[in-house]
């Protein structure tokens, strides 16, 4: 579906050509002075330099040609040479009418859908999810949903850290605590138990103790390294323990990700890449892609065009150990064999940008990934407390994600209770239990996604849980307000299905709302192409503001003109659908009441 800006630009471009100028000068943009006009063309300013005319003379020529055009309610030239435009209500009404019946509200789907691999989550097995895992999960989920919205085949992978030293640390700490377990009996030849010797709470208690112990006890640290080596070389007892740890930990991770409404198509980890590593490295050496340097194996990835030093990509240490880069390259090799992605999207802390530059270049140089495959890195900033430092618990530790969710749910409950008291009503327990987690999730996700990914942001529980301002609960409150109006409409015996047409706008607030509705595809397509969920947030916040402005100025339910009322109800239905589409792309939903 053609965009409003495209309609206006086409008309202006033709006018410039008719007046003897190049059509490129007819480009139109949204006005940054909505008090003066809705759209603006500045082409006369640029054309003046080429055609040696005063810009106002060129602008006057264009306006004179178009002053009676049916697309415009008003088109005027303003010194020194701007063309200010207001579009016709009839055109706007028809445009929204078409949007309402067009799939995806007129967004342009991919003509050739791609297979896209989104690597996000990145949690480590045997460790609890904490606030540091929030951004990759939330941003990744929104990008995955947005990419799918446009018709692509999107594969989301949690890519677990499940093959590193933490496994050796847990195994050795468990050995010291329960030395009689069969896994530590060198003479044991039977089947290993099906039940795990560890619960998730025991596992999460053991790891930090073992990690801290290894920093002070060199002998224990060496044991942990040897245990990791034994595991990675297929020791049956340690593999059996590893499987227990994996099963228990994955079940807990899934529970926590479910609470975030974050899902993965693949639950693969670093361990899945291990079988590919030996042949991959041998092949790289044989083809002279990789070479030995001071006992290690590296790939040169620097380019002549680099403005800063890009060190070689290290893929095997001098002691024969693999590294993260080795695992990531082997993971790409597996993904190419299984899925043949057209595009990769990786999300991690922005401090890893250099690392991913090295890995992406190494993957293409080695021929693991085709040279024309898009490889995108989204580096995100940190979640900080009000003191501007990384978000901590009151005791100074890293906050667990489930505790963060609980904290924001409590704040949402308090806000709902305050609102109920203002209205002189009380909260129903059943309604609260159902509504608070929905609103809390919107506060959490919107609070994150409304910020540009690369920027750090302050996690402010009071601000994020507010029902006013640029917050998730405010967006949900707007949707619930629309639902309430539609319910009142049907309670009066009227049919929503019959409210299926629009009239021309009758007020400035109505036209402003309709204009913002018409810009849906612009906003969503920009968020899609730029991998920028915050642009969806900007759009639905503007739309919510315009809806509430219209609501406060318009007596919708008491309107006596039935055709006018039907038009407003049709408009509200469309706004509701678009807002619901927007929040779904962000990864949360709306309740029926708040």
Image (spheres, rainbow, N blue to C red):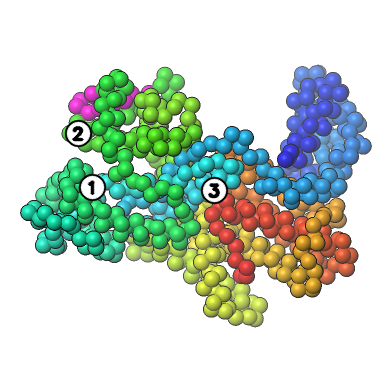
Residue corresponding to mark 1: 165
The residue lying at 84 percent from left, 28 percent from top is 15
Label 1 and label 2: CA atoms lie apart by 15 Å
Label 2 and label 3: CA atoms lie apart by 40 Å
339 lies left or right of 533: left
Q: Which comes sooner in the sequence, label 1 or label 2?
A: 1
Q: Secondary structure at mark 2?
A: loop
Q: Quadrant of the C terminus?
A: bottom right
Q: Residues within 10 Å of mark 1 (few under 14, many from 20)?
A: some
502 lies left or right of 525: right
The residue lying at 82 percent from left, 32 percent from top is 11
Up-down relation of residue 563 to residue 343 (above or below): below
Q: Nearer the viewer, residue 152 or 305?
A: 152
Label 1 and label 3: CA atoms lie apart by 34 Å
Up-down relation of residue 164 to residue 299 (above or below): below
Residue corresponding to mark 2: 320
The residue lying at 23 percent from left, 47 percent from top is 165
Q: Nearer the viewer, residue 407 or 142?
A: 142
Q: Secondary structure at mark 3?
A: helix
Q: Position of residue 394 (x, y in %)?
A: 37, 64
Q: Secondary structure at mark 1?
A: helix
151 lies left or right of 512: left
Residue corresponding to mark 3: 145
Q: Residues within 10 Å of mark 3 (few under 14, many from 20)?
A: some
Q: Position of residue 229 (x, y in %)?
A: 18, 43
Residue stretch rendered in magenta on the structure: 292-302
Q: Is residue 310 visible?
A: no
The residue lying at 76 percent from left, 70 percent from top is 490
Q: Position of residue 549 (x, y in %)?
A: 74, 59
Q: Nearer the viewer, residue 161 or 499?
A: 499
């Amino acid at each position: 579906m053609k965009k409003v800006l495209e309609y206006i630009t086409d008309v202006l471009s033709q006018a410039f050509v008719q007046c003897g100028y190049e059509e490129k000068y007819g480009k139109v943009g949204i006005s940054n002075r909505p008090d003066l006009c809705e759209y603006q063309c500045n082409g006369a300013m640029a054309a003046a330099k080429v055609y040696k005319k005063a810009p106002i003379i060129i602008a006057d020529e264009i306006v004179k040609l178009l002053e009676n055009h049916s697309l415009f309610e008003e088109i005027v030239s303003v010194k020194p040479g701007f063309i200010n435009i207001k579009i016709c209500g009839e055109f706007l009404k028809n445009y929204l009418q078409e949007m309402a019946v067009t799939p995806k509200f007129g967004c342009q789907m991919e003509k050739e859908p791609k297979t896209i691999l989104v690597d996000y989550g990145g949690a480590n097995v045997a460790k609890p999810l904490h606030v540091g895992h929030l951004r990759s999960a939330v941003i990744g989920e929104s990008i995955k949903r947005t990419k799918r919205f446009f018709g692509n085949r999107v594969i989301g992978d949690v890519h677990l850290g499940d093959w590193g030293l933490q496994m050796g640390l847990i195994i050795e700490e468990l050995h010291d605590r329960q030395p009689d377990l069969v896994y530590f009996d060198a003479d044991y030849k039977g089947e290993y138990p099906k039940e795990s010797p560890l619960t998730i709470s025991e596992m999460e208690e053991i790891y930090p103790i073992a990690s801290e112990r290894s920093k002070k006890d060199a002998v224990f640290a060496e044991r942990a390294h040897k245990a990791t080596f034994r595991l990675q070389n297929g020791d049956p007892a340690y593999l059996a323990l590893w499987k227990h740890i994996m099963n228990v930990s994955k079940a807990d991770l899934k529970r926590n990700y479910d609470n975030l409404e974050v899902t993965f198509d693949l639950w693969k980890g670093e361990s899945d890449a291990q079988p590919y590593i030996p042949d991959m490295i041998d092949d790289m050496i044989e083809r002279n892609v990789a070479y030995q340097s001071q006992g290690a194996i590296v790939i040169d990835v620097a380019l002549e065009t680099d403005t800063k030093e890009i060190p070689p990509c290290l893929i095997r240490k001098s002691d024969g150990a693999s590294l993260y880069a080795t695992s990531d390259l082997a993971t790409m090799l597996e993904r190419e064999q299984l899925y043949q992605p057209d595009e990769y999207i990786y999300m991690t802390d922005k401090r890893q940008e250099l690392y991913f530059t090295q890995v992406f270049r190494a993957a293409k140089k080695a021929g693991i990934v085709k040279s024309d495959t898009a490889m995108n890195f989204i580096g995100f900033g940190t979640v900080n407390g009000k003191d501007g430092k990384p978000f901590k618990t009151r005791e100074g530790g890293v906050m667990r994600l489930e505790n963060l969710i609980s904290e924001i749910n409590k704040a949402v409950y308090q806000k709902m209770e305050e609102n109920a008291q203002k209205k002189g009503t009380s909260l129903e327990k059943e309604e609260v239990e159902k509504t608070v987690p929905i609103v809390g999730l919107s506060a959490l996700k919107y609070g994150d996604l409304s910020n540009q990914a690369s920027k750090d942001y302050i996690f402010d529980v009071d601000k994020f849980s507010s029902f006013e301002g640029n917050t998730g609960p405010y967006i949900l409150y707007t949707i619930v307000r629309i639902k309430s109006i539609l319910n009142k409409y049907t309670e009066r015996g009227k049919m929503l299905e019959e409210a299926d047409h629009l009239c021309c706008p009758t007020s400035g607030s109505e036209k402003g709302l309709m204009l913002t509705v018409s810009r849906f595809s612009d906003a969503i397509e920009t968020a899609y192409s730029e991998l920028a969920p915050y642009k969806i947030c900007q759009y639905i916040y503007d739309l919510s503001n315009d809806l509430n402005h219209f609501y406060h100025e318009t007596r919708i339910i008491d309107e006596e003109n039935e055709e006018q009322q039907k038009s407003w109800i049709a408009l509200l239905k469309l706004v509701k659908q678009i807002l619901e589409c927007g929040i779904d792309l962000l990864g949360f939903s709306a309740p029926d009441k708040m």
